[in-house]
Amino acid sequence: MRMMRAYSDVYLGDVVENQGKLFDYVANTYPDKDTEDFINAYMTSKTRQSIDQAKAYVNTMDAKELWEYFKETEHYSLKQGKAMEGFIPNWIGEFYAYYQWYYNIPSAEVNQKILDK
């Protein structure tokens, strides 16, 4: 028996790649802002929930479109702090997206599992 995934694997590659690029974009574009706070806010947001629910409009956005949509939808502004460096933001973004899809759990729950560790 095949496990039910969060959404069609047709979207998977793009969602995983775009979330990695989104986290990387924020970290590299705003080196004096708290990347970790952004990731926590994003993973528990309505924007990410729309992706969890396979809403095509959001699932097909690229990283910069997602960033703009997230800021507008969530009324989010970055907090002062230190950005993550190197490949870490991209890796976290891709890992979180794949984990959410594979286990078919809400992104907010993925985030909480990580924070609880």
Image (cartoon, helix red, strand yellow):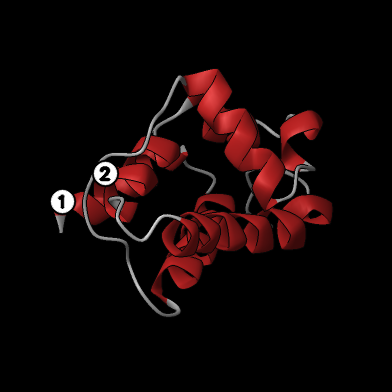
Q: Is residue 79 visible?
A: yes
Q: Position of residue 82 (x, y in %)?
A: 24, 59
Residue type highlighted by circle 2: Gln
Q: At 60% from the left edge and 62% from the top edge, which residue is drawn?
A: 21
Above or below, comparing residue 108 to residue 117 in the picture = above
63 relative to 83, above or below: above
* Displayed quadrant of residue 114: bottom left
Indicate left or right for 79 with 62 as reference. Answer: left
Q: In this view, does 91 lie above or below 97?
A: below
State the quadrant of the N terminus: bottom right
Measure the alpha-carbon separation of dots 2 and 1.
6 Å
Residue at 45% x, 19% y is 75
Q: Residue at x 20, y 51 (%)?
A: 115
In the rendered structure, the answer to whether residue 104 lies left or right of residue 75 reads right
* Secondary structure beneath label 1: helix
Q: Are marks 2 and 1 in contact (CB under 8 Å)?
A: yes
Assess disc 1: are there few (<14), some (14-19) or many (≥20) residues with their C-alpha within 10 Å of its C-alpha.
few
**Which residue occupies 35% across, 40% down?**
109
Give the farthest residue toward the right: 10
Q: Mark 1 points at which residue?
A: 116
Where residue 57 appears, x then y in whole percent?
79, 30
Which secondary structure lies at badge 2? helix
Is 29 left or right of 11, judged from the image as shown? left
Q: Can residue 1 be seen in this view?
A: no
Image x and y of residue 81, in percent: 21, 52
Furthest toward the bottom, the residue is 86
Residue type indicated by callout 1: Asp
Circle 2 Cα neighbour tier, 10 Å, few/some/many (<14 / 14–19 / ≥20): some
Kindly identify which numbered label has been placed on residue 81. Answer: none
Which residue position is annotated with label 2? Answer: 112
Q: In which quarter of the image is the C terminus?
A: bottom left
Q: Position of residue 68 (x, y in %)?
A: 62, 34
